[in-house]
């Protein structure tokens, strides 16, 4: 397809979605901010598994706008059907958990995620929200302590549930787009790259088992940043040459961390080590180019760049989708796989238009 025609196709596919979708996302984000209680986060009671022992305290919403959440049920007790029905009969559809107990809740969520995602009595919005929260929580823990053990197994199980859900529910990607974070943190970026990468692979009709392997690499692609000085990763401006040289080591660091943890999947390792390689051979850390850059890396690179452009940082506003795709098409055409990029644009139009 000639460049001019390809450029026009981006606008026709994406522009309408951009106007409508962004307004919806910002509206929802504002509502969530208003409802948040300092020191707590909310969960829908329908996501609590019946007769499952809960390792965190549950609180009821405050009686007034200035009140405090009220302790309802202490940890180490099972959540019964009677307890759920009592809450429902009193028009209580969500409870609160203290931020200091986010760790136990994260383990509970990972343990029960498959059942939550398969439960049709839980709204699609809530299932997607729990999926996104679970992935964020896992990556945040991994980045805080990448050598703590269990990272490979936990991330593998989580990705298996997530990919199965994406394949089973035709509208899951659209719903994920509505809650995707537009504020840049390494852990939110990692989850976003996972979402875009696996959605693109599904769009290209790759087998579900292959997409699970690709997805695990995408979810963990930036684990090496845990080894970079925070002054570098949190820099609010252009990096100095020495800082940039350090940042360029994070893909190799991530590769080494995963190998030390016993992770040996070639697809996932390829994505972690090479997601900053370019078809021109000017990427890092290995300077691969052309046919040496695998299809897995080409997909994850598109997802990585797109999310970096469309998320807000302390020193820049997020680009709108059309602007980001336009920039990628105009400035990075030689660095990206043209056919896959065209499919990415098509996918965004199909699922968010």
Image: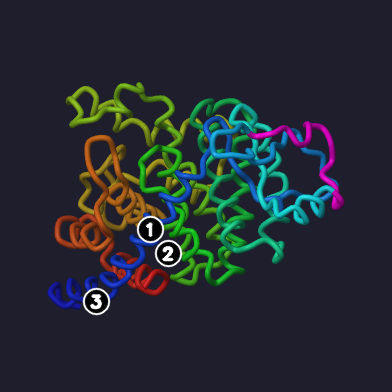
In the rendered image, residue 190, in percent from the top left (x then y), is placed at 44, 44
Q: Let me know if residue 153 appears in the view.
A: no
* Mark 2 vs 3, N-terminal side: 3
Label 1: state its secondary structure. Answer: helix
Find residue 250 and report its image quarter.
top left
Question: What is the crowding at mark 2: few (fewer than 14 residues within 10 Å), some, or many (at least 20)?
Answer: many
Quadrant, the C terminus: bottom left
| Of the pair 44 and 216, the residue shown nearer to us | 44
Instruction: Kindly identify which residue carries mark 2.
Output: 200
Mark linked to residue 12: 3
Tell me the CA gap for discs 2 and 3: 19 Å
Give above or below for 73 relative to 276.
Answer: above
Could you give the CA–CA distance between mark 1 and mark 3, rounded to whole angstroms? Answer: 22 Å
Which scheme is used to colour this image of the protein?
rainbow
Label 2 secondary element: helix
x and y percentages locating residue 18 in the rendered image:
30, 65
Mark 1 vs mark 3: give the one in front: 3
Between 80 and 147, the one lying in front of the other is: 80
Q: Is 88 left, or right, of 43 in this rendering?
A: right
Q: Which residue is mark 1?
A: 299
Q: Is residue 272 left or right of residue 121?
A: left
What label does residue 236 carry, if any? none
Instruction: Locate the N terminus and report the quarter of the image it occupies.
Output: bottom left
* For residue 185, side relative to residue 79 (left or right): left
Q: Are marks 1 and 2 in contact (CB under 8 Å)?
A: yes
Q: Residue 327 appears at what percent x and percent y?
A: 18, 57
State the residue lying farthest toward the left: 4
């Amino acid at each position: 397809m000639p460049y001019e025609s390809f450029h026009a196709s981006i606008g026709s596919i994406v522009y309408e979605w951009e106007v409508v979708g962004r307004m919806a996302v910002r509206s929802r984000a504002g509502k969530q901010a208003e409802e948040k209680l300092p020191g707590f986060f909310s969960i829908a009671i329908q996501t609590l598994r019946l007769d499952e022992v809960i390792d965190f305290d549950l609180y009821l919403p405050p009686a007034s706008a200035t009140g405090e959440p009220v302790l309802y049920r202490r940890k180490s007790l099972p959540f019964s059907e009677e307890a759920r029905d009592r809450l429902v009969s009193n028009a209580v559809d969500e409870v609160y958990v203290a931020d200091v107990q986010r760790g136990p809740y994260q383990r509970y969520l990972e343990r029960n995620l498959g059942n939550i995602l398969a439960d049709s009595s839980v709204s699609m919005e809530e299932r997607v929200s729990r999926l996104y929260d679970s992935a964020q929580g896992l990556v945040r823990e991994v980045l805080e302590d990448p050598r703590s053990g269990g990272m490979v197994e936990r991330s593998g199980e989580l990705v298996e549930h997530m990919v199965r859900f994406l394949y089973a529910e035709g509208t899951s990607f659209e719903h994920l787009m509505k809650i995707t974070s537009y504020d840049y943190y390494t852990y939110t970026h990692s989850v976003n790259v996972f979402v875009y990468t696996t959605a693109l692979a599904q769009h290209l009709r790759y087998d579900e088992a292959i997409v699970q392997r690709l997805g695990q690499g995408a979810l963990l692609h930036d684990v090496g940043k845990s080894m970079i000085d925070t002054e570098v990763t949190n820099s609010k401006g252009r990096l100095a040459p020495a800082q940039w040289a350090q940042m360029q080591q994070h893909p190799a660091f991530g590769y080494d961390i995963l190998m030390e943890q016993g992770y040996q999947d070639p697809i996932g390792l390829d994505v972690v080590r090479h997601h900053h390689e370019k078809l021109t051979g000017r990427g890092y850390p290995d300077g691969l180019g052309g046919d040496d850059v695998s299809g897995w890396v080409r997909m994850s690179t598109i997802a990585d760049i797109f999310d970096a452009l469309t998320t807000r940082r302390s020193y820049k506003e997020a680009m709108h989708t059309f602007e980001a795709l336009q920039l990628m098409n105009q400035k990075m055409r030689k660095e990206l796989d043209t056919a896959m990029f065209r499919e990415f644009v098509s996918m965004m139009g199909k699922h968010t238009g």
